[in-house]
Amino acid sequence: MNRTTLSLIAATVALAAVTGFATLNEPDAPAADTAEAAAVLPVERTGLLCPAPSASDLAETTYTSFTPVTKGAGSDGSAQLQAAPRESTDPATEDDGKTTEDGTPTGDTDADKAADDNAADDKKTAAAKPVLTPKVPGTPVTGETSGADGPALVGTAEGGFAPGWTVQQTTQVTAGNGRGLLGVTCTAPDTEFWFPGVSTAADRTDYVHLTNPDDSAAVADIELYGKDGAVATTVGEGLTIPAHSSEPILLSTLTGEKQDDLTVHVNVRSGRVGAAVQALDDKLGGDWLAASTDPAGTLVVPGIPKDATAVRLVVFAPGDADADLKVQLASPTGLITPAGQETLHVKGGMTTAVDLGDVTRGEAGSLVLTPADGSAPVVAAVRVVRGKGDKQESAFIPATGPVVARASVVGNGAKDTTLSLTAPTGTAKVKVTASAGTGGGTAASKTYTIGQGTTQDVQLPVPAGLKGTYALTVENLSAGTPVYASRTLTATNGGIPGFTVQTLPDDRGTVAVPEADEDLTVLQK
């Protein structure tokens, strides 16, 4: 007779290794005795998805990959990004289902069939070739692509490269629709996304990019909500995203309505996808809009640039209940209320937008939305404009989650980076580490105190002997005190102040694994 002991902790670690996304040991979640009985371990597998960067021939795109050093994670494993084929969304190129007697689609010649076969082989080859492979945790690596053929990327990190793995995609477009600096942090696959701040106005060209990392097709619905509620769509339901591929979906093809402020809800009914919105403006340039954090009563939009000339807040309340929100700005000296914008009423199922003007007035600032009694949960984002006249540029900042333990952001330069930290409810200590550069250098760290209700644009540590770009890792040293963070990159081109802002939600690089209360033993004959 053999005795086989099954450990609950081993089973839990295996689950974390498969998914790479698990709940952190948040300070206020477990009771004290539960916390003492739990082990905090690094995750062992993480997946990230990057959308296709641009359709412009003038685009220059840089990818940067980084994994912070995590205690207990080891140095083995790998992180790898591969190209995902971009699928066509032009109805004119879709198969109408009609065939000739030999089964060939109507109008296809033998040459057409051969071309299709070759194209399919090319897709497989491109998708199988790694485009960015980091060598060691703690040091970022970078790669570049140019033109309109940059693919969406599907990535997986394992072992020591998994905890806190992050990838930044930054694109510069010098002219044309959506010109400027466009940046996005590649995201984990999920089944639901909210994007307040999209538009189908005549001067906007907005795409929802959906990327499927899995071996089977995903099916998703795209819902639009405007100032009067749900917007009727023609082909927004049951969209199929083939395995290991990416689909850019032009929002204006889903509805004939022209609205300045809309909220997109991506609901995945089968499989998983990564989602991001590329918003291109004829006059104000373009940028990526990342998904808002999940609906909540209290939201924080961190790091509005201090030289913003216009700020537009867009809020949506899912469901039928209305939301009444108090609007405050966390400034360097504390929480203040914008004049004339003390409260905001958001009707259930409708999108509400309000212009806040130059609300930061030359100082660092973050928006803090808090509920009135019984207020419904909401999602939110802001559109920020810098510059004046014909030299304006725009970017988006979604509401984001706090840095519970740690978060990283990559692609930072010695002179083009601003890190904003805010602590809306209590004073917090925050450690910021600048990694070695992509071409060399020595890491450096600083610790900051962020006062209650304030936002600080901190003076960054710069790696000694820096060559290339570097990563910033933010660690919250004050357990139980929420800290929110964002990073702004700038790049002026032809007098136009190009910029992009990325938020830093917690990287969920570790998971709390409870010890087994009893020895679970299976007897095997």
Image (cartoon, rainbow, N blue to C red):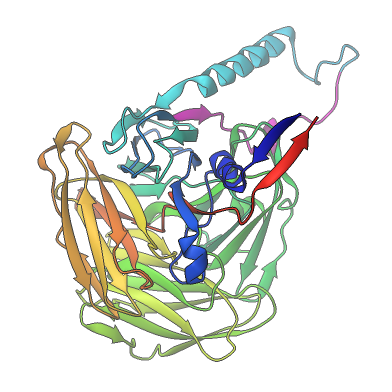
Residue at figure coordinates x 44%, y 79% from the top left: 369
Residue at figure coordinates x 34%, y 43% from the top left: 170
Quadrant in which the C terminus appears: top right
Q: What stretch is highlighted in magenta?
A: 80-99
Left or right: 95 in relation to 304: right
x then y, percent, for residue 222? 67, 55
x then y, percent, for residue 469? 22, 40
Residue at figure coordinates x 37%, y 75% from the top left: 367
Depicted 309 relative to depicted 509: above or below: below
Magenta highlight on residue 435:
no
Left or right: 214 in relation to 74: right
Left or right: 125 in relation to 107: left
Outermost residue on the front side: it is: 1
Quadrant in which the N terminus appears: top right
Magenta portion: prevailing SS class: loop
Q: Which of 504 and 280 is in front in this view?
A: 504
Left or right: 338 in relation to 249: left
Magenta highlight on residue 88:
yes
Depicted 118 relative to depicted 383: above or below: above
Depicted 280 relative to depicted 345: above or below: above
Where residue 328 sits, quadrant-wise, is bottom left
x then y, percent, for residue 207? 54, 49
